Amino acid sequence: MNEGAFAEEEEENKKNGTSPAQQQQQQQQIARRFLISSYDVTGVSNDLIALAKSVMTIKPNYSYTANEVQEQVTLINQLGVFKKIEPQVTETRDGMVIDFQLESHPEIRSIVVSGCDYLPNTVLTNAFKGQMNKVLNMHKFHSGMRKIRDWYNVNAIPSNIVGADVDTDTGVVELRISEPKIGNVNVRFLDAAGNPQKKGTTKPSIIARYLSNVKPGKVYSIKGVQDDLRAVYANCPVEDVSSQPIPRNAAAGVQQQQQQQAEGENLVSRDTTAKVQDSMIMDFTVNIVEKSPGGFSAGGGMSAKGLTEGNFGGLLANVNYVQRNLFGKCQKLNLGLEVVPKSNSKKGIDADIKLSLSDPWIEGDKRRTARTFNLNTAAISASQIYGASQFQDDNDEGAEDRLSSAFNVDANSTRMNVNNNIGDIGSSTINDNKVGDNNNSVGEKTGGFSKTISQLSGGKSRDDTVAKEDSTRNDENNAAPSNNKKDSSNEVRVRKLISSIDYSRPLANGWNGTFIASWCRSSLWDGQRNSILHDAYGAPLTFSGSGCDVAATSQLRVVYSAPDGDTQLMLSAEQALPLRPDWLNFTRLFARAQRTFQFPIFSSSKGREQNLGSMMSTDRETDEIKRGAFASTPIKLTLASKGGNVIGDLPPHEAFPIGGTNSVRGYNEGAVGTARKFVVGSAELVVPTGIEHISASLFFDCGSDLNSGSSILGDPAGTRGKPGSGFGYGAGFQLASPFGPLRLEYAKNDHGITRAHFGIGRSF
């Protein structure tokens, strides 16, 4: 030992008032061993005595040091049932006799919790299960309190266990818990720069009705606040919404309220409850940044098809008016008008209108019922049903000619067939190589098609049917033949006039129900907006046989979405009501299920993790609901399936198409089949690439029409050589965006044909 260390030791001994000689004597005394002739445990019941002795390690007639005797006290104390342990030592001629005098905790008769309203009794019972009518065990009791703290943490309630008192006479344990309560609730409108505004477009009372968890007297739950803010963001025209909890003293509540009112806040809920003992009161301010209420917009242009054909049929113009906050009640009005000139052979214009009025919460309704009125007309392509099969690709010129031949039959030969073959219907043969190879007869399989033309025409040849139904249009086409191989007259479009009203409301936690009543009139057009009754193979396009199908339907839809969004289920039943003899009568059933399994990994952005970790809880609330906020991307495995069935009247244009970006990838839209009943399954694995917001995916899709394609009027899938079932697999990339994932995928189907798919999200 050096001189400096020796000097420090001497100085320390002087402070303690002991000399080195005295310290040496104390150490020798501690290390001295004593003979213990016997020991005993007293002061408690025999069961507790046996419990204490079971952990002790000393034995009679053995020598022990003072430290080893003190270890026995520690071992007994670790049992948790004794509040007092005093070893009494008596010296005899045979050695030392030690009497361990114990005092146990009282028996627990009941547990009373004060200061909390949100804690369920079941949580309290499970936390202290097995401890009633037994001696209080502090270890088990503290374990029960940890379970209570864990429950508060899971439910994001910043509570605090103040303390616990035990009445030794009655055995009653009082557990004091402090839960933060919500006081006054205010709504404050901010501009885009964050400056307060005296008044907003939305009525504060409309916003307040979405704050089901942020109400005076309720417990402050971070999760509940987030749910309310999401509800405001989803149903009100707001750009951003955030909350600001402010602790206050109940005695200063009035003064603080006056100060807040002076700053432009709108008081929507007043705290009328008395001060809660041992509870903190939080005044809440909900900050709202509103969107623009809406306005007019207009546009126009020409479709790619119009540019190709070189006429004005591709011109279009539209005007829209949007009001996102009608009457300050968050009701949305959307009115649109699109005008398209008719084809060269006709004068005038075609106009499509779209009118919708939605109310996210009907005023006065306590069950949060939403209502939407719709009235719109639209012409949509039926290429999923009537388009060429994928196996008739762009290199198969014969397939394209076969599709165009139905409307380009020579007028003179057609009339001759009609006049000369009346007595021999069904015996005609088609010798044009455009229809089939080796001059196949009508009764044979031609061009790879599974149904012959004569079968679809009810025994009549295709030329006979076309000549009878549409000879005038054929004359016009022959007089002015198109320069394009793909004649627009071959295209089939469905023009629909739809009016509907739907009601939706939450049913239970995660469940939502919707009832829809609608009326729809569907008429069939060709690419030149002429009304047509048959497709290129003479098959009828409408179930009624006239130019349109009419259906009045009622639909009930139930949707479940788990809180974490990883599980989704949708069930739908639709019934068409034949209010008139010529209206459709069918029942449509549909189901879809999806489950996502997440495997968390470290975020590709370390800086974002650090920022999120340093955020206050209120900042995280705002960050999670802001548009464009991106969370760390885990590995995801998504399994999904859907299926449906139609019983009754089924026009081809109302059948289920299988294949495409949102169905079986690797196939064109509707190229797998057209079904009355179907099932489709999908599995997709999404893996982060290490580049922020970009993920890679592997997928496998399969689908089948369950052999129902031939039951559809005209068998549109069979005539076009669609297989009816198939699968596809491939890989792709996804770019996260505020509008949904941008997807670029490359797939290959079971026939070896490849296809690229691009889209925003995936409506499987």
Image (spheres, helix red, strand yellow):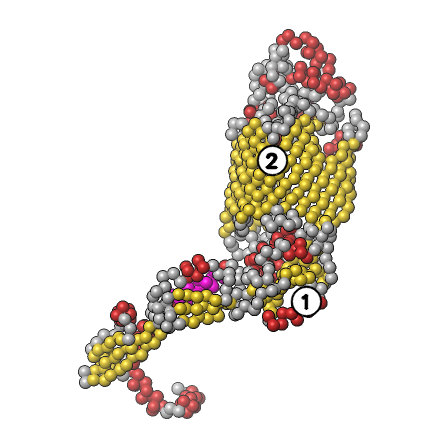
Quadrant occupied by the C terminus: top right
> Circle 2 — which element?
strand
Residue 484 visible somewhere in the drawing? no
> Circle 1 — which element?
helix
Judge by depth and name the residue closer to the eye, 64 or 574: 574
Quadrant occupied by the N terminus: bottom left
- Given the image, on which type of amino acid does mark 2 rest? Ser
- Given the image, on which type of amino acid does mark 1 rest? Gln
Please indicate whether residue 124 sits to the left or right of residue 693 in the image.
Answer: left
Report the magenta residues as a range: 140-152
Question: Alpha carbon of mark 1 to alpha carbon of mark 2: how far?
Answer: 50 Å
- Secondary structure character of the magenta stretch overall: helix
Does residue 129 sit above or below 639 in this rendering? Answer: below
Does residue 498 sit above or below 485 in this rendering? Answer: below
Residue position for label 2? 554
How far across and how far down the image is residue 361, in percent?
64, 49
Residue 706 visible somewhere in the drawing? yes
Badge count: 2
Residue visible at 37% across and 73% down? 168
How far across and how far down the image is residue 622, in percent?
62, 59
Residue visible at 70% across and 27% down? 525
Q: Is residue 418 magenta?
A: no
Does residue 450 sit above or below 205 in this rendering? Answer: above
Judge by depth and name the residue closer to the eye, 684 or 34: 34
Q: Is residue 144 magenta?
A: yes
Single out the residue that lies furthest toward the right. 347
Question: Mark 1–mark 2 contact, CB under 8 Å?
Answer: no
Question: Residue 612's image quarter?
Answer: bottom right
Judge by depth and name the residue closer to the eye, 329 or 229: 329
How far across and how far down the image is residue 67, in percent?
31, 79
Residue position for label 1? 260
